[in-house]
Image (tube, grey):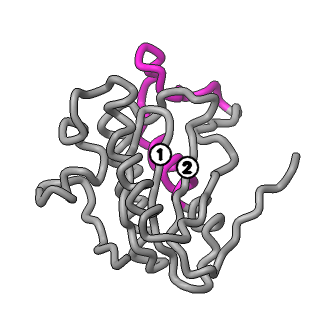
Amino acid sequence: MTRLRHYDSLGTARFVTFSCYRQLPALQSDRAKEIFIEQLDAARTKHGFKLLGYVVMPEHVHLVLHPPDGMKLGLVIREIKSRTARKYFAEVTEPTASCGSPQRPPTGAKRVFWQRRCYDYNCRMPETVIEKINYCHMNPVKRGLVAGPGDWKWSSYNWSQGAEDVPITIDEFQG
């Protein structure tokens, strides 16, 4: 397996994508999305990155963030994914095969929530940061999940439009 390179400490915002195991809709339920958002916010507090935009889709996540110098992005994403999976599986009480969520496996079997890798893109220009944030906002619309970006609760769109009752606040982008 080829190791993906992450170019840290370039001083740029990053567009990060990672997916649920086998593209299953593990993030379909509101509770699964809430758990992910809780872990994202805890990591932001702990590691000091700025969250500029995001979308949580049923089977993947896109983030636009600006890490501080010296932060190893891959390690932080791994921490978010690990903590999300652990908390999710700790709360699962019954298999939920009907909604496609990860199921509690037989005793001793490995539970898997996420694909191993994450993909990131260095946004070298302010225009690219805006483009990636807009991509996040339009993702649920393009997939046909909602009619407009404001109809999807699980993105930064409503925050960008001045709403305050949102799952997670967004940091100011200074492009």
Q: Is residue 83 left or right of residue 155?
A: right
| Sequence order check, earlier mark of 1 and 2 | 2
Amino acid type, label 1: Val
Question: Vertical placement of 45 versus 146: above or below?
Answer: below
Amino acid type, label 2: Thr
The residue positioned 38% from the left and 55% from the top of the image is 133
Identify the magenta region: 80-107
Identify the secondary structure beneath mark 2: strand
Q: Position of residue 32 (x, y in %)?
A: 38, 40
Mark 1–mark 2 contact, CB under 8 Å? yes
Residue 164 seen by the camera: no
Q: Which residue is mark 1?
A: 61
Closest to the observer: 143 or 165?
Answer: 143
Q: Which residue is mark 2?
A: 17
Q: CA distance from mark 1 to mark 2?
A: 6 Å
The residue positioned 39% from the left and 38% from the top of the image is 139
Q: How many marks?
A: 2
Question: Vertical placement of 156 versus 9: above or below?
Answer: above
The residue positioned 40% from the left and 74% from the top of the image is 50
Question: Vertical placement of 52 versus 91: above or below?
Answer: below
Closest to the observer: 92 or 159?
Answer: 159
Q: Position of residue 81 (x, y in %)?
A: 55, 53
The residue positioned 41% from the left and 37% from the top of the image is 57
